[in-house]
Amino acid sequence: MSLRKFITNKTTAALAVILTVFANTSVFAQDAAAGAAAATKVDMGEVYKSVIFYILVFLAICLFIAIVGKAIRVYELSREAQGKPVGINWNRVHASLFALFLVLGLYGVYWEYTVHGAMLLPDAASVHGKRIDEMFNLTLIITTIVFVVTHILLFGFSYIYRYSAKRKAYYYPHNNLIEKIWTILPALVLTVLVLMGFLTWRSIFFKVDDPKNMPIQIEVTSEQFKWSIRYPGADGVVGHKNYKLTTASNTLGIDFKDLKSRDDQMADEMVIPVGKPVKLILTSKDVIHSFYMPHFRVQLNTVPGMQTIFEFTPTITTAEMQQKTNDPNFKYLFYCAKICGSGHYNMQKVVRVVSMEEYKTWLAEQKTYLNDDLRKQFNLPVAPAPAQSGTDSAATDSAAVKTNQMALNK
Amino acid sequence: MSTIALHDEHNHDHADHGHHKETLISKYIFSMDHKMIAKQFLITGIIMAVIAMGLSILFRIQLAWPDKNFPFLETFLGKWAEGGRIKSDFYLALVTIHGTIMVFFVLTAGLSGTFSNLLIPLQIGARDMASPFLNMLSYWFFFTACVVMMASFFIQTGPASGGWTVYPPLSALPTAIPGSGMGMTLWLISMVLFVASSLMGGINYVSTILNMRTKGMDLWKMPLTIWAFFLTAILGILSFPVLVAGVVLLVFDRSFGTSFYLSDIVMGTNILPNEGGSPILWQHLFWFLGHPEVYIVIMPALGISSEVISVNSRKPIFGYHAMVYSLIGITVLSFIVWGHHMFVTGMNPLLGGVFMITTLIIAVPSAVKTFNYLATLWRGNIRFTPAMLFAIGLVSFFISGGLTGIFLGNASLDINLHDTYFVVAHFHLVMGSAAIFGMLAGVYHWYPKMFGRMMNAKLGYLHFWLTFIAAYLVFFPLHFLGLDGVPRRYYAFTEFEFMKKWLTVNVFVTWAAIMAALAQVAFLFNFFYSIYKGKKAPQNPWESNTLEWTAPVEHLHGNWPGEIPTVYRWPYDYSKPGHDADFIPQTVPFSQTMSSNLPHDFEGNAEAEKIQQDWEIANPVTENKG
């Protein structure tokens, strides 16, 4: 066997590649062995952290790729020198890779749907959330079908119609009928989705209050990086705020001139009764935040200078959800979803959905925003009896408001 | 018409007498040649892309290992990564600048700037752009914008960190986040420069396409690339000025105490004097650009992939007219969908319903384009060049990302998906990956035209497969984080019990991202090495029909040495039955292809049809038809 033949031999080329791979790995093995030997002295953790280590690994990979590339080149040149047809039919390689990618990809999608898909939020815990979930599922089914079919076509065509010198492509510039069909079909499907979405959207944001079942008002104010919750108190209405009244003791700027403010209660968590509509009044003190309560499919930005309102009805209590999810530590949460600064990633509060009785007992324990300090500030009589009857308090309040207004007008 | 003819004449003489003396500066730096400017845009775009990709790796490291220390980070980033851990403020700066660079500098200037400049004159048959000087200015404004943006990494308070959408008040108040100090000022300056650059480019592209097409190149004979660049430029011209308006108002709010976007703000207990503004106004102005911007990014990529898919399938693009009309449809509709970014921002819910309708309508032309790509591949004879691989990858990403858009465009579903990782996954597929793949397809395809040399195909294959797989591994799992209610732009997932189950996914995604980043080394090496050492390019390496491949490989100012070739046919006569070769360049008159002419080709020209009929009678079909 002549030397030239030896070099150009296919098997020799393959052997060369295998040899280099082996050489490389054995070098690595030696490195590892040396590392192990030195382990008594050197902390390997530091080595692994060091950038140089990874750069070296990467360079080794590059070297390996370069060697493989050269080997392929040598192989192809040798074929060429021998006058044989081109060694590697890259068109076939890529066609097969696309076919393989299709199969593995579809499996990957299936795996994602079943494994990661099982780690998602539990079923919606609100009335409108159920409608959103239904629509989500419908959209998911439609899009998944389209996704799978189009990808089968895309990669399938890539595989079937790979280049062949014997064949000529089919000259097929257009077909108006087909084009009309695949314009109208997506349009129809989308019309269905749009209609459903539109009706759901309107049912969420354009609610007519039922006088027999008035929603509970809860005001949530965001600031960097915390939430303040304000319950309306006995009158069921949260009172006015004016940001200009903000002080260290009145951090929300509640205007206690407004009678409705005086019984407003503060809370450390949001407790809401199951089955009762809740009207969230969302505001912000500083920058835009987003009030996000995913278990209830509720999200709305809190914007300084304006109120945003979201009304929803919880349907599953925390205890029930703990059972449903089989997680005794399960908690409903709301947190911030709009970039708002360095503490954006940790701006959360717990939501507890309870029975009406529990809610009432809990509510009775909450303190009012109005405390003795603020009373002095607003020139209100200090420490009135907390359980005054409605008419009494209104009378004293209005007197207090007058003095307060005068104080403010100075 | 006469002025253009004169212009041609002048250049013609010019080319015959050789070049006037070109200095290094006039050739490589302040060049007014569209081909050189295209290369400048491309290389600047690539450098910016590498930087932005590096930033993304930094924050991916933080997300994957939120409680580990990486001393090398401190070495590079100093006080922003004290103790080897990226700080929360700086994390936000990283995502902000990553987004800004990728969207504006890479996918707008790097993609549209490169290929509009390179291909418009070459594919429509013009000596250069309508205004070469404006074209040069366009690049230098862009370059300055890049420099100003990068400069913000070297100031005390760090770069802008309010997210790439820089919503005020966060972006307006330095007390809210340090990045809103000097860094934000630089961001705004950079953006004004960038918009100026885009406008100069866009006006140039539109006027060149409308006025300087060669003889015979009517609008319906233009390649789809040109249609895409044309409509992209129109979008840019109409929408970018709105961003400048928004930016100027923000500058006023920040520096001169006005209250366009600010009202009723209390930082701690410090009551700010601003009254009467609305943060929502910024969002309207921003997204009035921001949404067309998405299409400014994707349309050139779609145009490039149309061309690449047709050439390499050896088949005419299916439904050329439908492709153009769907581009026009996207262009028009993209102006009335911006509100879908604002469903839950407190915008009047009535508008939400309206914007949902317009948004889902825009899915129709996008669907048509996808189906037409598939039909083009059907019964083709597909050559898997690196460009073709990337174009197929683009179609795949466009499908995947487009379908998730149907969720987000639905206002009701958006309530729970807004600002979560679902959004991140969606736009990184449809706008990030798809547009980048379009750009890479363009680079591989037109590299011979740009540098007169070929890129190494095998490295291209390696680059494609690693990137394609890695991109899916990175972005597909992120959808599920979003569906579990994980918001985007979270510095760490450690503070929430339910997010801890995603930490392993984050580690996986980060490794996939690192793999994608390293795969780009194959591209970078290939790109820069081939400029000097690549194989010399043949005249028409892909056997393509379009006009640019008739221009000599060696660049010359004025593109064609003699007269500009005349165009006789549309650019997609591939594998036409009756013709011996499987492509017929646009410059070949029908009189030379009598055996393959179709009645449709003559567009109702009775005389030509008569000639063809006479010829067919004289030469009855024997064996070579069909």
Image (cartoon, coloured by chain):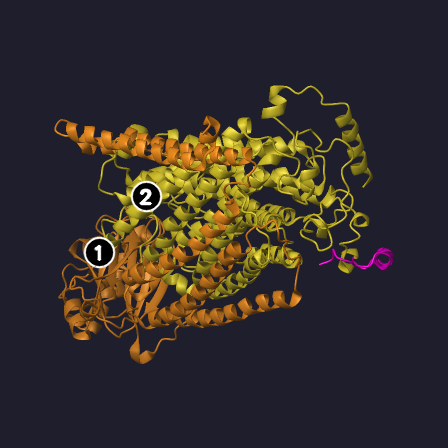
At x 21%, y 73%, the residue is A391
User: Please, is residue B32 above or below residue B577 in the view?
Assistant: above
The answer to which of A409 and A273 lies nearer the viewer is A273
At x 27%, y 32%, the residue is A26
Report whether A186 appears left or right of A211. Answer: right
Magenta highlight on residue B619: yes
At x 26%, y 55%, the residue is A227
Give the residues in magenta: B603-626
Residue extending furthest toward the bottom: A212
Residue count near mark 1 (Cα–Cα under 10 Å), binned few <14, some 14–19, many ≥20: many
Residue matched to label 1: A379
User: Please, is residue A298 above or below residue B196 in the view?
Assistant: below
Task: Residue type at mark 2: give it.
Answer: Trp
The residues tagged by marks 2 and 1 sit, at their Cα atoms, a distance apart of 63 Å
Q: Which chain is orange?
A: A
Under tag 2, what secondary structure? helix
Give me the disc on residue B511: 2
- Percent from the top left, x then y, of residue A262? 23, 63
Q: Chain of mark 1?
A: A
Q: Colour of chain B?
A: yellow
User: Please, is residue B231 above or below residue A8 in the view?
Assistant: below
